[in-house]
Image (tube, helix red, strand yellow):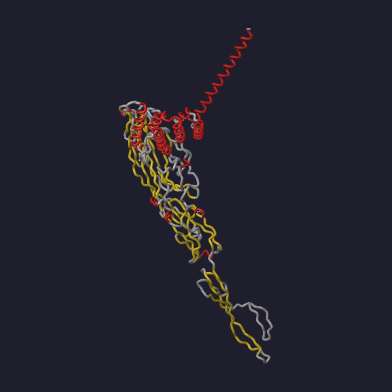
């Protein structure tokens, strides 16, 4: 708006300027239209200038006014602020709370076990202010932006990885994320079958005992989840007990099967093949139930009633075993020589699924495929003793 | 006179009933305490073992050596060694031999291995022998310790020690989880 005065200093009525020309000191930061509408283009500062023609009137001393053509310029500073990310939600991964974040806590972490082929993690952010113009300038780095919603992007989770994801406004990073797709591979090493003629039930009761099993090394990927500075806090004790009630054979509570957030565990099923009705009292104690199956909950380790160091090492932060969990199991079956008659047979089939699990924000997830193995102990009574009759230790769950 | 006799008989019967009843109650109390030591409830058995230790009840402490819980047996072994000394040695040696039965539960197997040390230390305390010569124990060491303990026992009894008459532990280190 402009307000003119006559030669004598009297004001005329105020009027709008329509013919001003507009300019920006930095057209990368701010543009201005022909009618003076300034728009932020990038984060930074710019000066918007309006220039218009004016007439300067003055009394020339002869009772007349002289008019000089001139122009007027007005400046206005403009600072373009980036939008802020006010929230982010995920599908297909668990968001890690700030209290469970190590290092730079402005980075938001998401963790998920590896999924099936083509499975994805979807991140959706909320920004403020949220205008179409701003959304037009949003871009993602490290994730595939949705074709329909620039505030949404996806990351594949079909392989273990650390994915650095950034959402940007122009060249400015609005927020940084880490998407951790974790997975463990399990390598077994055989603890071969052996036969012992030893005390089996009580001091005066000897029998045949067949044992065998495997030791396991679980290698967790990506290794950066242990070595980076900015990581989810998975070191230390678990918050919640893993699922499950009691061990099917020993009756021990499965609640103590994990003592850390990373855990190696095992499921078991078993059955007795007992054509000659050998009494359970004449077998190793506690006796094997006639039949029990794998748990239906894939995260339950029903053969994992404790996390004793002799059987499990669940500290993948140990510099000597970085990123690794170790475990072993050497089950056995025994039968007293006093039981049965010559040529009787007796079998105990034990089958196992070795797996890794991780507690993410209080919820347990399976983070490996099952490593299958079995010990089928087969006895035959010969010359008054139960001997090994072709017991099987193999990496499969065939022929239960 | 007849009435007086009847009265005496009645008084006698009352006294007899009273004595029998007291005896019966005593027996019940003893059985009750014994069953607590062997309770299948861990906490009941543990508290009972502590109580028997406090009361120095030798019979129940001996009974307690049959407990299914290694922690309970540990309390009772340590207590009875102090009370019985050499008299309990044979039992302890026998327990060391029978403690070499593999357990299906890893935790119980670990407890069983720890219990070896409780027994060996108790035998050392009674005999004055230095039996534990390595930190790690295995079947060979167990058999050596059994042999030395039995030899010591035989000498105390004044009998000739014949190692062939005693059983050795035949289970393997792998089966028993020894290194």
Identify the residue shown where x is 57% and y is 72%: A37
Residue B3 vs A287, above or below: the answer is: above
- A37 above or below B25? below
**Residue B127: where, in percent of width, then height?**
39, 33
State the residue in front, A388 or A33.
Answer: A388
Give the total number of marks visible in the rendering: 0
Location of residue A391 in the rendering, given as x and y in whole percent from the top left corner: 33, 36
Q: Is residue A173 left or right of residue B136?
A: right
Q: Is residue A108 placed above or below B104 in the rendered structure?
A: below
Residue B5: give x, y in percent of width and height.
61, 9
Residue at far top of view: B1
**Figure quadrant of the N terminus of chain B:** top right
Q: Which residue sits at x=61%, y=82%?
A: A54
Tell me which corner region of the image, top left, top right, bottom left or bottom right, holds residue B24: top right
The x and y percentages for residue A229 are 45, 57
Q: Is residue A148 visible?
A: yes
Q: Is residue B54 above or below residue A5?
A: above
Q: Is residue B87 left or right of residue B3?
A: left
Determine which quarter of the picture holds residue A56: bottom right
Pick the residue in front: A326 or A114: A326
> Could you tell me which quadrant the C terminus of chain B lies in?
top left
Q: Residue furthest bottom?
A: A62
Q: Is residue A35 left or right of residue A363?
A: right
On the question of residue B101 being in view, the answer is no
A273 or B71: which is nearer to us?
B71
């Amino acid at each position: 708006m402009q307000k003119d005065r006559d030669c004598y200093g009297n004001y005329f009525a105020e009027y709008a300027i329509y013919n001003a020309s507009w300019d920006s000191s930095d057209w990368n930061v701010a543009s201005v239209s022909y009618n003076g509408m300034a728009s932020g283009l990038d984060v930074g500062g710019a000066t918007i200038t309006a220039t218009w023609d004016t007439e300067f009137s003055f009394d020339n001393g002869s009772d007349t006014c002289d008019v000089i053509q001139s122009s007027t310029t007005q400046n206005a500073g403009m600072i373009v602020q980036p939008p802020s990310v006010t929230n982010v939600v995920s599908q297909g991964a668990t968001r890690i709370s700030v209290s469970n974040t190590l290092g730079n806590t402005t980075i938001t972490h998401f963790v998920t076990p590896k999924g099936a082929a083509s499975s994805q993690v979807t991140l959706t952010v909320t920004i403020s202010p949220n205008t179409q113009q701003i959304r037009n300038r949003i871009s993602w780095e490290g994730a595939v932006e949705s074709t329909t919603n620039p505030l949404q992007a996806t990351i594949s989770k079909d392989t273990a990885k650390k994915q650095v994801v950034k959402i940007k406004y122009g060249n400015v990073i609005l927020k940084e994320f880490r998407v951790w797709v974790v997975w463990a591979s399990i390598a077994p090493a055989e603890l071969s079958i052996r036969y012992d003629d030893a005390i089996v039930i009580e001091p005066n009761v000897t029998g045949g005992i067949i044992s065998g099993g495997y030791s396991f090394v679980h290698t967790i990927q990506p290794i950066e989840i242990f070595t980076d500075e900015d990581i989810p806090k998975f070191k230390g004790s678990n918050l919640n007990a893993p699922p499950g009630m009691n061990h099917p054979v020993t009756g021990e509570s499965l609640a103590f099967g994990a003592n850390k957030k990373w855990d190696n565990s095992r499921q078991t099923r078993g059955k007795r093949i007992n054509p000659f009705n050998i009494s359970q009292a004449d077998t190793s104690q506690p006796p094997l139930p006639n039949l029990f199956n794998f748990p239906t909950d894939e995260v339950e380790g029903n053969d994992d009633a404790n996390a004793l160091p002799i059987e499990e090492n669940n500290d993948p932060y140990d510099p000597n075993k970085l990123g690794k969990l170790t475990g072993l199991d050497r089950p056995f079956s025994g039968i007293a020589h006093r039981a049965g008659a010559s040529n009787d047979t007796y079998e105990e089939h034990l089958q196992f699924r070795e797996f890794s699990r991780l507690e993410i924000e209080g919820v347990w997830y399976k983070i490996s495929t099952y490593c299958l193995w079995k010990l089928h102990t087969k006895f035959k009574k010969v010359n008054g003793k139960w001997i090994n009759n072709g017991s099987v230790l193999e990496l499969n769950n065939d022929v239960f | 006179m007849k009435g007086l006799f009847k009265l005496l008989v009645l008084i006698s019967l009352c006294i007899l009933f009273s004595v029998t009843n007291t005896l019966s109650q005593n027996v019940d109390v003893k059985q009750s305490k014994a069953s607590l030591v062997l309770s299948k409830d861990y906490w009941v058995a543990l508290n009972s073992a502590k109580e028997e230790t406090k009361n120095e009840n030798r019979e129940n402490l001996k009974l307690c050596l049959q407990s299914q819980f290694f922690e309970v047996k540990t309390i009772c072994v340590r207590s009875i060694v102090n009370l019985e000394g050499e008299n309990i040695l044979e039992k302890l040696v026998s327990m060391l031999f029978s403690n070499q039965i593999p357990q299906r539960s890893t935790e119980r197997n670990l407890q069983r291995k720890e219990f070896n040390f409780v027994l060996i230390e108790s035998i050392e305390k009674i005999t004055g022998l230095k039996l534990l010569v390595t930190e790690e124990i295995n079947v060979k060491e167990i058999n050596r310790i059994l042999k030395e303990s039995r030899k010591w026992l035989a000498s105390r009894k004044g009998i000739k020690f014949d190692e062939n008459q005693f059983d050795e532990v035949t289970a393997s280190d792998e089966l028993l989880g020894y290194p």
